[in-house]
Image (cartoon, rainbow, N blue to C red):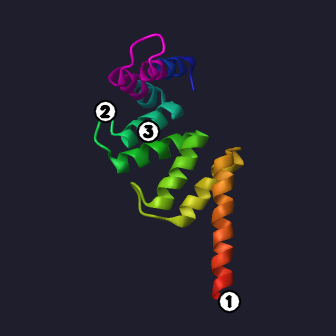
């Protein structure tokens, strides 16, 4: 990711939080959109997905939210990997798929994201319990 993309994304974050300026969701969205679309900035894609989840800038479009998180995850943003797993696990914006959820939890865990590791471990423990109950 380029220095320009990082600068544009940081400007968006400042608008979002009101650091050095009045908070402006519209300006933040413009910055994140520019960084995501022109520079393929993974964190900005995730921020756009977060805005979708919050219902800001556009209606809460779960399919678009999933698409943005997935693009960000494919580029390597670890928190987006976790969010993709959560969306697969809960069937939000995509058909529920526990196998895909586990794949994405493991990818995020492999990158050191502790919450993803915990979630993967919980899911494995639940599967083991279910198997034991059947036998």
Relative vertical location of residue 23 with respect to residue 116 in this rendering, above or below: above
Could you tell me residue 115's position as x and y percent? 64, 48
Q: Quick one: SS at disc 1? A: loop
Provide the residue span drawn in magenta.
Answer: 12-33
For mark 3, what is the residue? 50
Kindly identify which residue carries mark 2. 57
For residue 135, which numbered disc appears in the image? 1
Classify residue 106 by image quadrant.
bottom right
Q: Residues within 10 Å of mark 2 (few under 14, many from 20)?
A: some
Taking the image as shown, residue 102 lies to the left or right of residue 91, namely right
Q: Is residue 81 left or right of residue 36?
A: right
Is the residue marked by circle 1 packed among few (<14), some (14-19), or many (20+) residues within 10 Å?
few
48 relative to 60, above or below = above
- Residue 99: x %, y % from top left: 56, 65
Image quarter where the C terminus lies is: bottom right
Query: How many numbered discs sit on the rendered protein?
Result: 3
Give how far across and how far down residue 83 sits, in percent.
Answer: 52, 48
The residue at 33%/35% (across/down) is 56
């Amino acid at each position: 990711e380029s220095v320009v993309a990082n600068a544009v994304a940081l400007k968006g974050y400042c608008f979002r939080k009101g650091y050095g300026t009045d908070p402006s969701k519209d300006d933040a969205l413009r910055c994140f959109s520019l960084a995501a679309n022109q520079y393929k900035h993974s964190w900005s894609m995730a921020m756009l997905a977060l805005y979708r989840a919050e219902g800001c800038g556009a209606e809460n479009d779960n399919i678009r939210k999933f698409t943005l998180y997935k693009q960000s995850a494919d580029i390597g943003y670890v928190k987006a990997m976790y969010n993709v797993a959560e969306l697969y696990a809960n069937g939000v914006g995509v058909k529920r798929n526990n196998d895909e959820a586990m794949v994405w939890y493991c990818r995020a865990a492999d990158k050191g994201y502790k919450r993803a590791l915990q979630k993967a471990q919980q899911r494995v423990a639940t599967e083991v319990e279910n198997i034991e109950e059947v036998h």
